[in-house]
């Protein structure tokens, strides 16, 4: 069902372009308006010992500090999880994370993350195109040197996300 461990991947689209796109994607989830919280929490999953992963985490942290963004009237808050130091399943549930962004990970089972997000109804996102094929719901890829939004149809449905048809018309659907 899910793929196993994968080698570290690179992102094709820089974070300064990805982050606003992903926030826009989240705004198309009809469930966001129904959340009973003042904040929308996005967990950033990274590996502190993996330079590429940590650099992307740092860029997202800077984006969060320097940009006041919200979705559905809820301020977005980033929380950070080093998968080499934490039990991801317990932390995501305890912190009531609404979504996760998976940075490039080295020798890590993406299927494990997908299992957690589906079981806890947490939207999963990444800038690694291959992760969408492995079950992550939303990705940002590159086509003809332009960013494209990739949607894993099975993934987002199993995570309980309710994307509007307007978004789905604009995306490349991955089965």
Image (cartoon, helix red, strand yellow):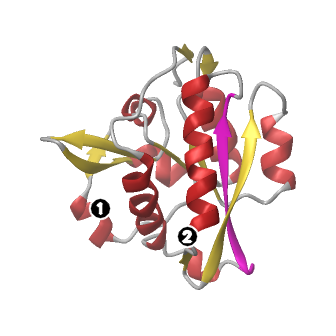
Which quadrant, please, contains the C terminus? top left
**With respect to residue 62, does 110 lie above or below?**
above
State the image coordinates of residue 40 (x, y, percent, origin top left): 66, 69
State the image coordinates of residue 159 (x, y, percent, origin top left): 57, 52
Task: Rate crowding at label 2 as few (under 14), some (14 to 19) or many (20 or more) other CA atoms within 10 Å.
Answer: few
| Residue at the image position 48 percent from the left and 36 percent from the top | 135
Task: Rate crowding at label 1 as few (under 14), some (14 to 19) or many (20 or more) other CA atoms within 10 Å.
Answer: some
Q: Find the magenta span and give its range.
A: 36-47
SS for dot 2? loop
Label annotation for residue 168? 1
Front residue of 24/31: it is 24
State the image coordinates of residue 151 (x, y, percent, origin top left): 36, 49
Q: Earlier in the sequence, mark 2 or mark 1?
A: 2
Give the foreground label among 2 and 1. 2
Label annotation for residue 65? none
Q: What secondary structure is the magenta-colored segment mainly?
A: strand
Query: Left of 54 or right of it: where is 91?
Result: right
Front residue of 63/28: it is 63
Residue occupying the far bottom of the picture: 73
- Disc 2, disc 1: CB below 8 Å? no
Count of picture labels? 2
Visible residue check, residue 123: no
| Residue at the image position 31 percent from the left and 66 percent from the top | 167
> Which residue is identified by label 2?
67
SS for dot 1? helix
Label 2, label 1: how far apart the Cα atoms are: 27 Å
Query: Left of 158 or right of it: where is 22?
Result: left
């Amino acid at each position: 069902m899910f793929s196993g461990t994968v080698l570290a991947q690179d992102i094709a689209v820089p974070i300064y372009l990805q982050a606003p796109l992903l926030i826009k994607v989240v705004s198309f989830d009809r469930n966001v308006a129904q959340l009973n919280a003042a904040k929308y929490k996005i967990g950033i999953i990274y590996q502190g010992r993996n330079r590429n992963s940590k650099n992307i985490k740092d860029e997202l942290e800077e984006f969060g500090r320097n940009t006041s963004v919200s979705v559905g009237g809820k301020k977005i808050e980033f929380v950070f999880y080093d998968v080499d130091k934490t039990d991801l399943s317990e932390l995501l549930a305890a912190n009531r994370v609404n979504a996760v962004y998976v940075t490039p990970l080295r020798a890590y089972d993406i299927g494990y993350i997908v299992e957690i997000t589906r079981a806890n109804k947490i939207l999963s996102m990444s800038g690694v195109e291959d992760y969408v094929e492995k079950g992550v719901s939303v990705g940002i890829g590159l086509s003809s040197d332009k960013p494209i939004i990739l949607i894993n149809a099975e993934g987002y449905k199993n995570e309980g996300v309710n994307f509007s048809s307007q978004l789905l018309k604009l995306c490349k659907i991955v089965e």
